[in-house]
Image (tube, rainbow, N blue to C red):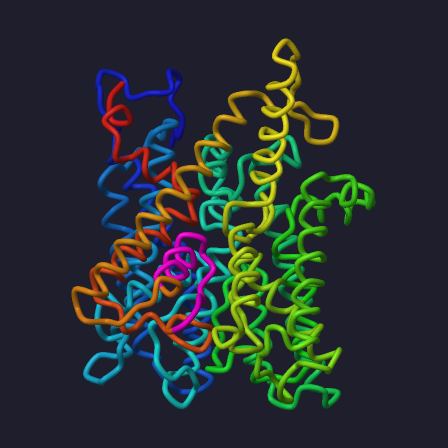
Amino acid sequence: MSLVRSDGGFPGSVRVDWRTSVAVTGTVLKFLSLAMFVPLVVAFVYGDDLLVFGATIFISLAIGSALERIDPDPDLGPREALLLVAIVWLVVAVVGAIPYVLAGWGTESTLAQPVNALFESMSGFTTTGATVMGEISTDQHSHALLMWRQLTQWLGGMGIIVLMVAILPELAVNGAELMQSEAPGPSLQKLTPQIAETARVLWIVYLAFTVLLAVLLYGLSLVGLAPNMDLFNAIAHAFSTLPTGGFSPQSASIAAFSAAVQWVIIPFMVVAGTNFALFWHVFDGDVSALFEDTEFRWYAGALASITAVLFGLLYTGTAPAQALGGVTAGAPENALRQAAFQIGSLMNSTGFATSDFAQWGTEGKILLLFAMFIGGSAGSTGGGIKVIRWVIVLKVLRRELFSTAHPEAVRPIRLGNAVVDEDGIRGVLAFTLLYLALFGVAAVVISLDASRVGLALTPLEAISASLATIGNIGPGFGIVGPYGSYLMFPDTSKLLMIFLMWIGRLEILPVLVLFTGGFWKR
């Protein structure tokens, strides 16, 4: 079948051919059902929820086959590709919620409610890490369901569409547009002449780091440095670290494990927030590509400087925190570990925690909030605005100050040796302003909606809930802190947050453009 139009549009019509996008979505759902065999195997091993995932696989295959029949010979143009990306992420989240509903059917589980199940599923696939689950443990939920929860994050981390481009040759024809719409950051670096090969390269690097982390975590258990890090937990946490997801089968998150586990996870969170294309160059022998990259230098500098400041606050007791082993004040290893872990987690939108930072002092909270706004690198699995956009914004501001004093001067914006074109600069400024505007409006709506139902919500809690969902960060402050949940919010607020997670993962514009009249007309 052909997936690109010679004229880039839909001949003879002024409208986007939505049937094409829906049909290809069906193909994606059929492949998603293959991923469900992972929790199915876990269900078989542990003897729980076997029917849940057997039924979900059947439902996913049936829905996928039905959608494929809508257009037996899909012809995917540029706008159909954009529509496809938005639809896929929404439909996949809906189908991914089915196991939660089935597993909770007839019980008092909060996930038996469709809105809660969709919230958990969307949070997983978008690697947000926000949860509406109460007690999170294998005593309350099956191993299979918890593994599915972890797997949704791993699938969403590098990107479902990127995976489909890598394994479906017919999608490679329009693969660049598809991957650009899904990839986090303002640009997509093509590593090989064929876009499908680039998609495979990114997934290979992603898979390699995932396997390495799982091996290291399980190895700590074998040598006695992490007694409760069994094989299940090692795989589960590898599945959520590399995609910067933050889900954990343990209610205490990474605080449930030893300091050795925490030190091992920290560098992998930093890796997850780095442009994965750089690691391909490193593996190919060009180590200098990593340190010559402008964004990576800013990213590493921001991580180091913010961590240093937080370490000082924790060590001196300015921002006291009850952590493993007690108060961190005066304990250098504990203070450094807490600072490095929390900044590495929140700046990259991972969402893991080793301390209840919701109980920290004001100075510590403000610093963490600042880190949340920065985000990871373009081409990483991290969320947020992204370091590269902030770099460009700062350079634009500097140029404007210079131009005020020298109005006749022409001063281009450079990243390394490359000049950023003005269209790209406008795109960065538009995204950043739109991101901040949506975040602010959503915070107000969440606060008003909480008041409507009598939920006492502080301004900081409303702000952090909005930022944590649109930035795909997960935890916030107060009731949505690292050991809290979003369960108490009314369904209207949860639906808003589901929308925020969806548009946040797809970088806002590919979704919002669907709501404009110009998109649907020639």
Q: Residue at x 34, y 42 (%)?
A: 24
| Residue located farthest toward the top when viewing the structure as drawn | 408
Which of 377/371 is in front?
A: 371
Quarter of image, res 483? bottom left
Q: Left or right of 466: which side holds 277?
A: right
Eyeballing the image, is 489 above or below 86?
below
The residue depicted at 82 percent of the width and 42 percent of the height is: 288
Q: Is residue 147 above or below residue 414?
A: below
**399 or 66, nearer to the observer:** 399
Count how many numbered circles sit on residues in the image. Answer: 0
Give the percent coordinates (x, y) of residue 5.
Answer: 38, 22
Q: Residue at x 30, y 75 (%)?
A: 52
Residue 27 x/y as whole percent: 35, 47
- Give whichever of 189, 371 is nearer the camera: 371
> Which residues, given as a range, are shown in magenta?
462-478
Is 466 inside the magenta-drawn segment? yes
Given residues 322 and 27, the one toward you in this image is 322
Is residue 158 shown left or right of residue 100?
Answer: right
Which quadrant, please, contains the N terminus?
top left
Q: Is residue 153 above or below residue 219?
A: above
Q: Give coordinates of residue 408: x percent, y percent.
A: 63, 9
Q: Quadrant of the C terminus?
A: top left
On the image, the x and y values in percent for residue 418 come to 70, 25
Q: In the figure, 214 relative to 76: above or below?
A: below
